[in-house]
Image (cartoon, rainbow, N blue to C red):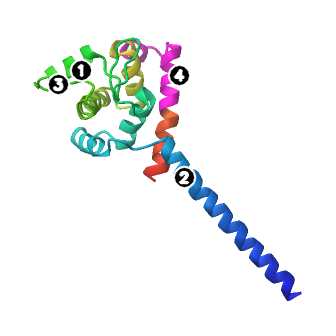
C-alpha cells in the first residue's frame, strides 16, 4: 500500500515538473518570436516620448519583424516603416537635421515620436494604429461617423494584428 502511494506521489511530482518545464520552454520559445531587440533605443525613446515600450516593440514586430533595412513596396523604410516624407516632416517638426532613415536608432526615435504625436491627438491606441497605417486624414474622417468604422480592409487587418501582438508583448514582458 505504501509503495503505491509513493509511486503516485512520485508520478504527480514528475507530472508537475514536466508541466513546469513545458511552460518555461514555451515562454522561451514565445520570447524568440516576440523579441525585444534594439532595447536601449526603445527604452530611451519610450521614456522621452511617453510611449509604452510594448507599443514600440509591437509596431516594430508588425511593420518589419525587426529587419532594420526593410523597405516596403510603397516606400516605407526601416524598423518602424516610416515613409520618407513622414520622416522628413517629423525631423522638421523637431527642428532637427534628417539623418539615415534606416539607422535603427534614428528610425525608432522618429517612429516613436510619431506614435506619441498620434496618441496626443487621438488618445486611443486603436486610433493611433489606424492613423499609423491609413493616415490621420482618414482617421479624422472615420471619427466623424457614428459608429467609428475602419473603412480599409488592410487597416482593419493591421489594427487587429497589432492588438494581438501588443497583447503578446504585455503578457510576456510587462505583467
Q: Earlier in the sequence, mark 2 or mark 3?
A: 2
Give the Cα distance between marks 4 and 3.
32 Å
Q: Earlier in the sequence, mark 4 or mark 2?
A: 2
Q: Which secondary structure is most common in the magenta stretch? A: helix
Q: Circle 2 sits on which residue? A: 27
Q: Position of residue 159 (x, y in %)?
A: 48, 26
Where disc 3 sits, the SS reads loop
Q: Earlier in the sequence, mark 3 or mark 1?
A: 1
Give the Cα distance between marks 2 and 3.
37 Å
Q: Is residue 116 visible?
A: yes
Contact? badges 2 and 1 (CB < 8 Å): no
**What range of the chain is rendered magenta?**
139-162
Give the Cα distance between marks 2 and 1.
36 Å
Q: Position of residue 13 (x, y in %)?
A: 70, 73
Q: Circle 4 sits on which residue? A: 157
Callout count: 4
Q: Earlier in the sequence, mark 4 or mark 3?
A: 3
Give the Cα distance between marks 4 and 1.
24 Å
Q: Residue at x 43, y 43 (%)?
A: 35
Contact? badges 4 and 2 (CB < 8 Å): no
In the drawing, what numbered circle is on residue 87?
1
Amino acid at each position: 500500500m505504501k509503495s503505491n502511494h509513493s509511486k503516485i506521489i512520485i508520478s504527480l511530482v514528475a507530472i508537475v515538473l514536466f508541466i513546469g518545464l513545458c511552460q518555461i520552454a514555451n515562454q522561451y520559445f514565445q520570447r524568440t518570436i516576440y523579441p525585444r531587440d534594439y532595447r536601449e533605443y526603445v527604452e530611451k525613446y519610450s521614456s522621452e516620448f511617453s510611449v509604452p515600450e510594448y507599443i514600440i516593440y509591437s509596431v516594430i514586430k508588425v511593420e518589419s519583424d525587426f529587419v532594420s533595412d526593410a523597405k516596403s513596396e510603397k516606400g516605407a523604410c526601416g524598423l518602424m516603416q516610416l515613409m520618407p516624407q513622414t520622416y522628413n516632416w517629423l525631423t522638421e517638426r523637431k527642428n532637427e537635421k534628417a539623418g539615415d532613415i534606416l539607422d535603427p536608432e534614428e528610425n525608432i526615435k522618429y517612429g516613436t515620436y510619431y506614435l506619441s504625436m498620434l496618441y496626443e491627438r487621438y488618445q486611443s491606441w486603436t486610433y493611433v494604429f489606424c492613423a499609423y497605417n491609413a493616415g490621420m486624414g482618414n482617421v479624422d474622417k472615420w471619427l466623424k461617423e457614428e459608429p467609428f468604422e475602419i473603412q480599409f480592409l488592410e487597416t482593419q487587418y493591421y489594427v487587429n494584428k497589432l492588438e494581438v501582438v501588443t497583447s503578446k508583448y504585455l503578457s510576456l514582458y510587462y505583467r
